[in-house]
Amino acid sequence: MPLFLNKVIRKYWYSKHKLPDWFYKDFGNLVNQQRDTQSRFTLSQTDFYPCLADRTNTTPIDRHYIYHPAWAARIIALTSPTLHIDISSTIHFSTILSAFVQTEFYDYRPAELELDNFLSDRADLTSLFFTNDSVQSLSCMHTVEHVGLGRYGDPIDYNGDIKAMYELARVLAPGGCLLFVIPVGYESKILFNAHRIYTAASVAERFKSLGLKLVEFSYIPENNGRMVSSDIQSFVTTDKYGCGCFWFTK
């Protein structure tokens, strides 16, 4: 956005919304401090950029997207692959991972990124171009729940998620590692057009029917508490929207 237009929009915002007193007090304090030292910046009310919701006692986190990449990274550190392939997980995961492991990232909407040890390209999760039994280290995290709901411009397909799970199982190499993350709750439902929610047992059974073995299941509770490992057979939750982390092998 052009700078002049940005300033016009901010001026309009200020005319409609009153900034809190503490904001002006802090600004005045900063102005006074600038007068008493060597001025190094332009400091003007025309450059106000109010961030009013960040004075919290703790750092806010998105529990799903903080915990599950940390879980996956620890497993990859343990398995030490020479190449890791990620399908449409949060892009931060792949870019950071590429500092230590050669990484390929594929998405229905490819990311325009250029980094050493990193490749970004397009792939359709319902029809992956990899050959059977060819991928040794694979992740697809917080992705399959979206497939077929049109949110990202993909075709509407009620069973798009099933097709995606089949493809992940098809391309995984014998002895390979699949890190799979998906919303988990006490019942399966579609929140159109955002995502699906699954029961943990239904996900485990789906991949079991595709020839995969569950190595580990961990769960991120919906509202609070740390990530916990659990036996899938005894796992029960009353959460509507927690996060299930599945480590499968073939």
Image (spheres, rainbow, N blue to C red):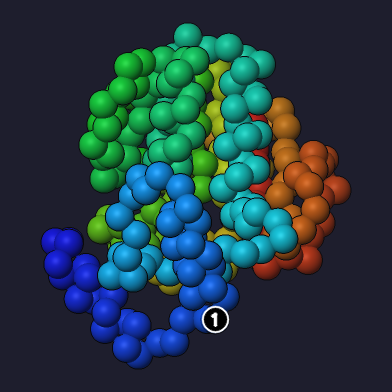
The quadrant of the rendering that contains the C terminus is: top right
Image point 14% across, 67% down: which residue? 4
Residue reaching furthest top? 82
**In the rendered image, which quarter is residue 122 located in?**
top left
Q: Name the residue carrying label 1.
A: 21
Residue toward you, 53 or 113: 53
Q: Position of residue 53 (x, y in %)?
A: 55, 69
Figure quadrant of residue 44: bottom left
Residue visible at 48% across and 53% down?
36
Q: Which residue lies furthest to the right in this view?
A: 234
- Badge 1 crowding class, 10 Å Cα cut-off, few under 14, some 14 to 19, many 20 or more, is few
Residue 3 in the image, given as x and y percentages of width and height: 17, 62
Q: Can residue 186 be seen in this view?
A: no
Residue 236 in sight from this viewpoint: yes
Q: Which amino acid is tagged 1?
A: Asp
Which quarter of the rendering shows the N terminus?
bottom left
Q: In this view, does 66 lie to the left or right of 155?
A: right
Q: Is mark 1 on a helix, strand or loop?
A: helix
Up-down relation of residue 220 to residue 238 (above or below): above
